Image (spheres, rainbow, N blue to C red):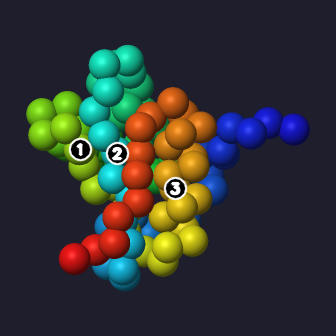
Amino acid sequence: MSSQPSPSSAPVGRTLRASGWQTVVHNDPVNLMSYVEWVFMAYFRLPQRRAHRLMLDVHNNGRAVVSKGQREQMEADVQAMHGFGLWATIEEVP
């Protein structure tokens, strides 16, 4: 059994809908920008343009909010990002 999350585990349309928590992906010196973009498209099912903009936010600003919602789902998203080798955290929406 693989611990790698399936790209289809995130429901379409859930990304960036406000609730109370958010998943933040942080910049790192390891992963290629193209890989980060691919992860956003594969896991969150984002269109290429949106994934590219978020990847640039991570690269240029050091972080990007990639999903918002209930705490349990944000924890799952953070675990998934870790499974892809990305550095991610969960934050309460101010």
Residue in view at x 66 percent, y 45 percent: 6
Q: Which residue is mark 3?
A: 77
Q: Amino acid at mark 3?
A: Asp
Of the residues under marks 1 and 2, which one precedes in the sequence?
Answer: 2
Q: Amino acid at mark 1?
A: Arg
Q: Amino acid at mark 2?
A: Val
As helix, strand or loop, the secondary structure at mark 1 comes to strand
As helix, strand or loop, the secondary structure at mark 2 comes to strand
Query: Residue 86, position in %: x, y?
Result: 44, 34
Neighbourhood count class around disc 2 (C-alpha, 10 Å): few under 14, some 14–19, many 20 upward: many
Residue in view at x 51 percent, y 30 percent: 85
Query: Residue 13, position in %: x, y?
Result: 43, 68
Q: Which residue is mark 1?
A: 63
Q: Is residue 26 visible?
A: yes
**Quick check: 13 left or right of 60?**
right
Query: Residue 54, position in %: x, y?
Result: 24, 45
Mark number displayed over residue 25:
2
